[in-house]
Amino acid sequence: MAKRMSNKERIQRKGLEAAAAAVEKAKKKESTAVAKAEKPAKSPGASTKSGGSKSRLAGAPVPSQRLKLVWKVFNASGKEVAVFSYPEKTEADAMAEKLTTKSGQPHFVNGVKVPLEAT
């Protein structure tokens, strides 16, 4: 049966583990610094990624960008068929209904936010 460690022994063990972790961290930092030094330089035209959260989707708009809502008519496979401005929702619904009856395949209208063009 194992002997129970005293508080003094626990503190000493924690200190030794912390020292070993510090040495490992220093070695890792040194190896990454060497690897970065050996990495080829980027070309001047290469874009750099600005700071931002990694969870942000690639296609998601930048929060400071102004958006507008448009109505898009899609076919059953999700392909865009037509685009209507926000006040023209009734026209978009009518076109989707017309295409559904004409082709026999379902078409639907979906509201999509797109960047506002600078005019």
Image (tube, grey):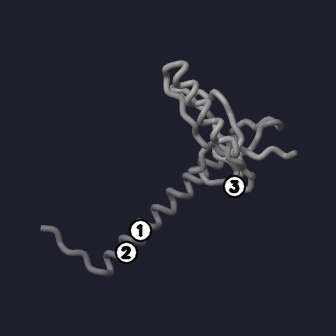
**Residue 100 vertical placement versus 45 (above, below):** above
Q: Nearer the viewer, mark 2 or mark 3?
A: 3
Q: Which mark is residue 96?
A: none
Circle 3 is placed at which residue position? 63
Instruction: Name the foreground residue: 61 vs 90.
Output: 90
Circle 2 is placed at which residue position? 12
Left or right side of 71 for 101: left
Amino acid found under the numbered disc labelled 2: Gln
Amino acid found under the numbered disc labelled 1: Leu
**Dot 1 alpha-carbon crowd within 10 angstroms: few under 14, some 14 to 19, many 20 or more:** few
Secondary element at image label 1: helix
- Residue 8 image position (x, y, % from top left): 33, 80
Circle 1 is placed at which residue position? 16
Q: Residue at x 54, y 29 (%)?
A: 107
**Total of numbered circles in the picture?**
3
**Residue 37 vertical placement versus 106 (above, below):** below
- Residue 19 image position (x, y, % from top left): 47, 66
- Separation (CA) of disc 3 from disc 1: 48 Å
Amino acid found under the numbered disc labelled 3: Pro
Of the 4 image quadrants, the one containing the C terminus is top right
- Residue 18 image position (x, y, % from top left): 45, 67
Instruction: Name the foreground residue: 9 vs 85.
Output: 85
Image-quadrant location for residue 59: top right
Q: Earlier in the sequence, mark 2 or mark 3?
A: 2
Q: Residue at x 68, y 42 (%)?
A: 70
Whether residues under marks 1 and 2 lie with C-beta atoms below 8 angstroms apart, the answer is: yes
- Separation (CA) of disc 1 from disc 2: 6 Å
Left or right side of 3 for 106: right
